[in-house]
Image (spheres, rainbow, N blue to C red):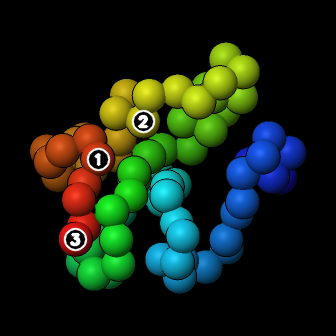
Amino acid sequence: QMICDHGGRFDPFFTGSGTTHFVAENLSYAKLKQLKSKQSMYVVSPDWITESVKAGKRQNESAFSILKVQYGIQRKYAFL
């Protein structure tokens, strides 16, 4: 609800079409492989949403990247 209330769009199922951010607390290797086949996007924790709303503006995704924490890879992962 918070995403929609602040101008975003939420898709409960990942389709990859037009997706700019994938929000998750954890990411399995299988999901990482699925995301790699789709497109370039940010993979961030839910805190990115709440902190962006609290600040009143979009926060830097790199501070909320779960890929760096889990896999030690770039903050924005180029899936192309």
Separation (CA) of disc 2 from disc 3: 19 Å
**Crowdedness of circle 1 by 10 Å Cα count: few (<14), some, many (20+)?**
some
Question: At which x and y percent is residue 60?
Answer: 44, 28
Residue matched to label 1: 76
Q: Mark 2 near mark 3, Cβ–Cβ under 8 Å?
A: no
Q: In percent of the image, x 67 and y 17: which residue is there?
A: 55
Left/right of residue 17 with respect to residue 28 in the rendered view: right
Three-letter code for the amino acid on which mark 3 is drawn: Leu
Residue matched to label 2: 61
Question: What is the number of callouts on the image?
Answer: 3
Question: At which x and y percent is residue 40?
Answer: 33, 62
Three-letter code for the amino acid on which mark 1 is drawn: Lys
Residue 44 at least partly seen: yes
| Among the two numbered marks 2 and 3 on one chain, the one whose residue lies closer to the N terminus | 2
Q: Nearer the viewer, mark 2 or mark 3?
A: 3
Q: Can you say which quadrant of the picture contains the C terminus?
A: bottom left
Q: In percent of the image, x 34 and y 33: which residue is there?
A: 62
Question: At which x and y percent is residue 51?
Answer: 61, 26
Residue 54 at least partly seen: no
Q: Tag 1, which secondary structure?
A: strand
Question: At which x and y percent is residue 73?
Answer: 15, 48
Q: Which mark is residue 80?
A: 3
